[in-house]
Amino acid sequence: MFACLIIDEMHPSLLPMLASIGVAGDYQPQLKAADVPAALAAQPYTGLVIRSKLLVTSDLLRHGPHLRYVARAGAGVDNIDEAALKTAGVMLVNAPEGNRDAVGEFALGQLLALLRHSATADAEVRRGEWLREANRGEELGTKTVGLLGYGHMGRALARRLSGLGCVVLACDQDPTIRPDGHAALVPLAELQARAEVLSLHIPYSAANHEVVNEAFLGAFAHPIWLVNTARGEVLDQAALVAGLRSGRVRGAVLDVLENEKLAALSPAQQIRFDYLRAAPNVLLSPHIGGWTTQSYVRINKVLVAKIKLVLGA
């Protein structure tokens, strides 16, 4: 039987799923990142299952000479050095199929809430205020929505938007991406010329660091509503705040931030965060777009199916 080290909290269904393909899961979510190299060196693990607490580097891989795969329980792999894995002959598997529907639903729900002032109206009624005209909203179905990135998450949102009657445009640099009937694939310039809503669905990489910046936002022909359920680092938060102040950005949904350790913000980050959390046209949430009961189990199913392929089990 193959052995696999699991260092993050996972749904308990993972262990029996792994056992069904001949993999013994060693579940140690209490391990700190600094203790993982020693744990890998102590046993001939063929697999490592992680979420986000660990950086997978060439130095780490040297402690796991028997590793055949690293499995990321989720979509993003920005904490993994893919070149180092390739050099070491270790396969990378992730599970964007597991939480894409959760992200699609969440992005749609938050966008609807933003356009209809749901959070503000709720707070007002709880205070005993009944302000109807002040909360007159916008219908999403009348909008042209631009999706930056058209992988699993972008497509999941597009399927839901198309049912509302939106015009959905998508831009993706991957030449293998093909249209699916839910969005029209267009160049970035066309998306910026037509979109009234911008939703971000690109992975984080050095090339994508703050790619959505002041110049990027300034190129839109219309003031936009902005949704970010991707990674905080792809969006220049200073540019976002400037856009909100000027009206170039009409409102924002932020499930991710430039620094999600709110107790460790730099002075500049704190100023930006204080503005965002006080703004009535900004909806904030703690990176929960893909965080549902169903996705918790589905991620396991996707990972196990891919691990089975890697092992030829």
Image (spheres, rainbow, N blue to C red):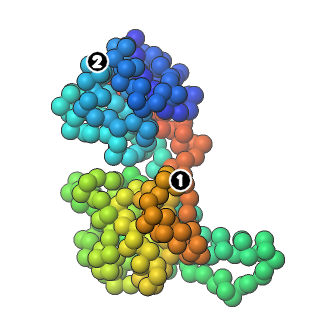
Q: Residue at x 55, y 63 (%)?
A: 284
Residue at 41% x, 78% y is 242
Up the image or down, 62 lies above or below 186; here it is above
Q: In x, y percent, where is residue 76?
A: 38, 46
Per the image, the residue denoted by label 2 is 66
In the displayed structure, does residue 58 sit left or right of residue 227? left
Judge whether residue 237 can be spotted in this image: yes
Q: Residue furthest bottom?
A: 133
Q: Residue at horizontal 34%, vertical 53%?
A: 203
Q: Nearer the viewer, mark 2 or mark 1?
A: 1
Instruction: Classify residue 249 as left or right of residue 175.
Output: right
For the C terminus, the image quarter is: top left
Crowd rating for badge 2 (residues with CA inside 10 Å; few <14, some 14–19, many 20+): some
The percent coordinates of residue 215 (x first, y second) are 28, 76
Q: Is residue 166 visible?
A: no
Residue at which label 1 appears:
263
How far across and how far down the image is residue 113, in percent? 60, 70
